[in-house]
Image: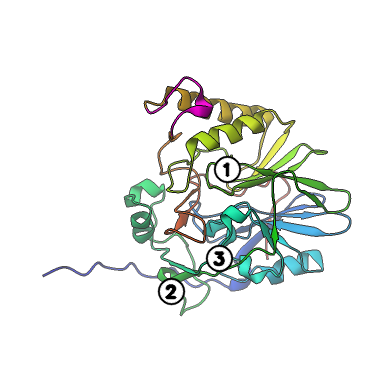
């Protein structure tokens, strides 16, 4: 007789109005996080406001509606730009009328995903401990008594604007340059504010182990993308997970990855850009996902903790 696995008790219910935490980073830039989401899946959502319009970069899991909060902060609807299609970055995309991103990471299919840690680990081919979290659930609260985190649903969100490398997003006084930087996923994007030297990097680069071992990842392409970033005049990185960091740390992360690629047993040559796939670290740390929203099992986020704000204290909204 087979034992039925015991499902842990559900997390306690939270007031949905307190689900998001909002922090001012600098004038025109606001960080939003889902405060009850485990570090593994907790993404940074960057609200960038220019003189004429605003955009939201990534939109989290969307367990609680996000678009109304963004509209309160900006006074109008604004587009969401998806750095890629994983659920922790694109889960709320269906709430927004304008959805921009790269066509190779378009969230076109409905996906039901369990947020039970053991289930999520199994979806990724990992053991519980390899997720870098000790909780039974990947959320510490639920938004209502009837909410079942084993039945999380990522809804289809077809793109309304396809962003390609070299495109420019004009906000009025702020111009963001689109960089197509495949590797973590085929359609990974970053946005570069050249005037300020600020890079909104999504999961292309963050201060943790870079994950290049997903089914849709391409380590050689990842290496080329990072080498391209190293040549840009980036002064500050605003990543998709974890804390912001500066130019020196960016170069350290890139150099460590390129060095690891060059030394990987599977490397076909001493040129890291032409070598075969190689992971920069264990799958238990760094943003992790099983694939774009259009395919594959569940996604995961970083092992690092805390929001990425370097500004004043945050307030729950």
Q: Percent from the top left, x then y, of residue 264?
A: 41, 26
- Residue where numbered disc 2 is placed: 148
Q: CA distance from mark 2 to mark 1?
A: 34 Å
Q: Earlier in the sequence, mark 1 or mark 3?
A: 3
Q: Nearer the viewer, residue 21 or 105?
A: 105
Q: Residues within 10 Å of mark 2 (few under 14, many from 20)?
A: some
Q: Residues within 10 Å of mark 1 (few under 14, many from 20)?
A: many
Q: Residue at x 70, y 68 (%)?
A: 69
- Residue where numbered disc 1 is placed: 182
Q: In the rendered image of this protein, does residue 108 appear above or below residue 284?
A: below
Q: CA distance from mark 1 to mark 3?
A: 19 Å
- Residue where numbered disc 3 is placed: 108
Task: Check whether the beta carbons of the residues at disc 2 and disc 1 lie within 8 A of each other.
Answer: no
Q: Percent from the top left, x then y, of residue 126?
A: 34, 49
Q: Residue at x 53, y 41 (%)?
A: 183
Span shown in magenta: 266-276
Q: Earlier in the sequence, mark 2 or mark 1?
A: 2
Kind of element beneath mark 1: loop
Kind of element beneath mark 2: loop
Q: CA distance from mark 2 to mark 3?
A: 23 Å
Task: Check whether the beta carbons of the residues at disc 1 and disc 3 lie within 8 A of each other.
Answer: no
In the image, which is nearer the foreground, mark 2 or mark 1? 1
Q: Nearer the viewer, residue 20 or 70?
A: 70
In the image, which is nearer the foreground, mark 2 or mark 3? 3
Mainly helix, strand or loop, the magenta region? loop
- Position of the N terminus by quadrant: bottom left
Q: In the rendered image of this protein, does residue 183 appear above or below residue 40?
A: above
């Amino acid at each position: 007789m087979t034992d039925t696995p015991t499902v842990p008790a559900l997390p306690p219910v939270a007031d949905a109005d307190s689900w998001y935490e909002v922090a001012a980073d600098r004038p025109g830039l606001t960080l939003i996080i889902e405060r009850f989401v485990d570090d593994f899946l907790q993404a940074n959502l960057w609200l960038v406001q220019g003189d004429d319009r605003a955009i939201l970069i990534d939109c989290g899991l969307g367990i609680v509606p996000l678009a109304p909060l963004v509209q309160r902060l900006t006074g109008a609807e604004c587009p969401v730009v998806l750095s890629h299609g994983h659920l922790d970055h694109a889960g709320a995309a269906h709430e927004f009328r304008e959805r921009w991103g790269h066509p190779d990471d378009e969230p076109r299919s409905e996906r039901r995903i369990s947020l039970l840690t053991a289930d999520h680990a199994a979806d990724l081919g990992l053991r519980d401990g390899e997720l870098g979290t000790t909780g039974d659930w990947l959320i510490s609260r639920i938004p209502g008594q009837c909410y079942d985190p084993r039945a999380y649903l990522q809804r289809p969100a077809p793109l309304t604007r396809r962003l390609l490398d070299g495109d420019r997003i004009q906000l009025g006084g702020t111009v963001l340059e689109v960089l197509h930087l495949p590797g973590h996923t085929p359609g990974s994007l970053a946005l570069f504010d050249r005037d300020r030297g600020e890079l909104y990097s999504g999961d292309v680069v963050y201060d943790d182990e870079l994950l290049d071992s997903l089914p849709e990842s391409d380590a050689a392409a990842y290496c080329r993308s990072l080498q391209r970033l190293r040549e840009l005049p980036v002064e500050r990185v605003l990543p998709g997970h974890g804390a912001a960091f500066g130019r020196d740390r960016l170069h350290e992360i890139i150099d460590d990855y390129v060095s690891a690629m060059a030394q990987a047993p599977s490397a076909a040559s001493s040129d890291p850009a032409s070598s075969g796939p190689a992971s920069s670290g264990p799958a238990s740390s760094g943003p992790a996902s099983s694939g774009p929203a259009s395919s594959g099992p569940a996604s995961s986020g970083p092992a690092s903790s805390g929001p990425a704000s370097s500004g004043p204290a945050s307030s729950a909204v």
